[in-house]
Amino acid sequence: MAEPTTVDRPSRRAMVLTAIPVIGLAIAVDQATKSWALHHLAGRSPRHVAWTLQLDFSLNSGMAFSLGRGAGGLVVPLAIAVVALVLVTSRSLAGPLAGVAVGLVVGGAVSNLVDRLARSQGGAVIDFIDFQWWPIFNLADASIVVGGLALALVASRRSPG
């Protein structure tokens, strides 16, 4: 049986009502952890947590996971474009999982934009999660990746076949 081409209102509403608080929570938790890192990790030696995980303050002028260092002028417009693209394409999504996915991607991207535009770090974001074998990152980066994977899952469920 073919899936309908339009999203029913209750499912769409569930997506929106889930996405909005997830966006707010992603921003709040990321900004709180970055403030903590700024006040407790900056200028200090890394703090070992477990296995290879350590907390180590770093400023990232590039994109997620320290990619694109030196491309600072492109990062803000690119992040705004990603948020706009996710919001536009999310109009065809429905259900709570889609809402969580959209909320994580948008919340993470907006929180990193807040760092770049509102903190006095010269357009850089605060990173502090360091596995020592993976680029250092923050919770906004993790939200974007987890949300992106969840979006792929939602989209694969909607694909015919």
Image: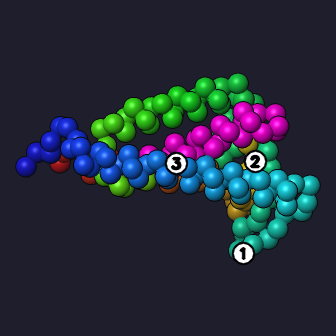
The residue singled out by tag 1 in the image is 50
Q: Nearer the viewer, mark 1 or mark 2?
A: 2
Between 76 and 114, the one lying in front of the other is 114
Q: How many marks?
A: 3
61 falls in the magenta region: no
Q: Is residue 6 left or right of residue 123?
A: left
Q: Residue furthest left?
A: 1
Instruction: Tell me which amino acid carries mark 1.
Output: Ala
- Picture layout, residue 77 above or below residue 113: above
Sequence order check: which comes first, mark 3 or mark 1? Answer: 3
* Label at residue 126: 2
SS for tag 1?
strand
Between 161 and 141, the one lying in front of the other is 141
- Contact? badges 3 and 1 (CB < 8 Å): no
SS for tag 3?
helix
- Residue name at image x 82 percent, y 37 percent: 120
Between 77 and 26, the one lying in front of the other is 26
SS for tag 2?
strand
Sequence order check: which comes first, mark 1 or mark 2? Answer: 1
How far apart marks 3 and 2 lie (CA) works out to 19 Å
Q: Which residues are magenta?
A: 101-124
Q: Residues within 10 Å of mark 2 (few under 14, many from 20)?
A: many
The residue singled out by tag 3 in the image is 23
Q: Residues within 10 Å of mark 1 (few under 14, many from 20)?
A: few
- Residue name at image x 55 percent, y 49 percent: 24
Q: Nearer the viewer, mark 3 or mark 1?
A: 3
Instruction: Tell me which amino acid carries mark 2.
Output: Ile
Q: Is residue 47 left or right of residue 34?
A: right
